[in-house]
Amino acid sequence: MTINIRAIVLYSHDGLQRTLNFRCEGLNIITGASKTGKSALIHIVDYCAGSDECHVPEGVIKRKVAWYAVIFAKGDEELLLARKNPDKGRSTSSEIHIRFGQKLLVPEMVELNKNIDIEGIKSVLTRYVGIEENLHVPDEDHTRAPLAANFSHARIFCYQDQSLIDNKNQLFFNQSDSFVAQAIRDTLPYFVGAVSKDELLKQNELNQLRRAARLLERQVDAQVSWQQGAEQRASTMLAEARQVGLVGAGVRHVSLEQTFLVLRNIARVRLSPADDVGDTTSELGELMAERENLRSQYSDVKMRLDEVKMFGSNRGEYEAELVEQGARLKAISLIPEVQSSTATCPLCHSTVQSSQEKLAELHGDLREVSDRIAAIRSQNPRLQTMIGELSAELEDIAGKIRDNQAQMNAVVQQNEVLRSQRETEVRRSRVQGRISAFLETENAEQRDDLATRLSLINSRIARLSSDLSGESFEDRLRNAESVLAEYMTSYARRLQLEHSDGQTRLDFRRLTVVSDTRFGSIRLENLGSGDNWVGCHVLTHMALHRLFRERQRPVPAFLIMDQPSKAHYPPDAEITEEEIEDDDRAAVLRLFKFLYERSTHDGFQTIVIDHADEPQDWFQESIIEKWRGGLKLVPDSWPERS
């Protein structure tokens, strides 16, 4: 027994409820006009059942619904999953409510508190649908990770939305995702019952053991190969050790045993870490800083000396000018002093008007010049002393700079020596490391252990292969494919599809429908019309679910299809009775009659969302709601979120 959908519930932002009840067995039809919310139902169910994102179309439903809920039924046991509509601008919500019980009542919205997360939902549904512990391990030549079938894989066979149901390139829900397509290939054999739980565990153990055996075989082969070339490699390792000074220059390869002994001794030597070799970088930095300081001092003293010398040079020129002026004025001493108002010229002895005031002024200038000359000459010794002191200080600083440079040269040379020592230590460490790695592979005990482990694994492989030597997995898978092909061929003829005179089958590897005719095999994308594409989608899923039910496989016992009549009735427009061709109506009735007949046993539930509303009694009995005349999934009166 597996699960059906008992009801879908929507909550408005002010707490109102819209409940859509279903019959848990048989055909359930929701017929209605365009833009009434029909196509949102698949995405609502998938979202509540743990989808990572909410794919309900943007519009009225997203704006007016606060919570979605689905009630699943498994006999008398029921499971309610409610999930908050994502906030505006978000694609998902982690607010999920779950409850179990019999004949559950629809809870009020205030009762919908978060009590589970998405991973919890997937785990609960996996157990609820009856999926046992399983693991698909890919073949040895594949690198993808092992995969355990769960509810997320099982629900792929339960949805056929409007964009998928007539898709000629994609048969299953979300198959366009390459990872999903591969997951379908990996899990479909489990779902069709090609493997039992015990056999699956044994087969997976066998695959893992074969992988382990191949790995051990490669390791054993590597040990044998290593032994064959050991002498040459040992001699090479010894030569490298001589080059870096780990052994003396006279140590040579004599025999494999002796060389291994020497190499083991080298591997045990405790080398000085390269970091232990001294480093003079800080000392060099200090000397460079000292040199910059000395250069700064030298520049300062040199500038002061130049200024003093320039000052002395200027004083000398000034003194020479005063001496020359004084020499001119000394001629005034030749003129005698006169007391009268007249005087006799000493040169021509003529009588001239006395110039006592002028002579007095000239004598005054001479005395002033003489005083200045005396003053300057009195200061010259101090100036020369300062020049001498500054010159001595400058020479002292220059000597310190030369000493500093000599120290720096010595430190640089020492750095080169230390760098060479560090490089030598690094080379020694590398050679010692390679020697250690080489010696680790030379381990007789390890070789014996590998051989023992390989023998035990091969023994277990033999026992598992014997246990699985009866009816093989491939035989059961071919049987499932054959049974499916029988059902699909019968259904294709029942629906009067093209190329149905031959065999119609499911290609498990390509995940497509193939019609085998007298003229060759035709895949789904080449089958022609939309009527054939829809028919192949319908018959494939109905055949799979028949096999699931007959073999009591853990796949939900419901199939939701959106617009299976779209190849004959335009899905986005209302049409009148007069516009429907007789052939189109006959094809639609044939399809719905087939769904009606195939859904009336084995506890299987088919939910169809469509425009079609045919007058036949069986069709009208299958209708659970008609969304016309203002009736919709979401009432117009519901408020939009603020």
Image (cartoon, helix red, strand yellow):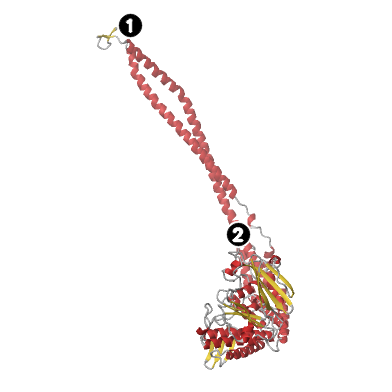
Q: Earlier in the sequence, mark 1 or mark 2?
A: 1
| Callout 1 secondary element | loop
232 to 331, vertically: above or below: below
| Farthest residue, direction front | 629
What residue is shown with label 2? Answer: 424
Q: Residues within 10 Å of mark 1 (few under 14, many from 20)?
A: few
Task: Give left or right: position of 301 versus 322.
Answer: right
Q: Residue at x 46, y 31 (%)?
A: 308
The amino acid beneath tag 2 is: Thr
**Residue 525 on image: x %, y %:** 52, 84
Residue for badge 1: 339
The amino acid marked with disc number 1 is: Gln
Question: How far apart in space, not on screen, are marks 1 and 2 (Cα)?
Answer: 108 Å
> Which of pointers 1 and 2 indicates the residue nearer the eye?
1
> In this view of the protein, which residue sits in the foreground, 50 or 606?
606
Residue 257, quarter of picture: bottom right
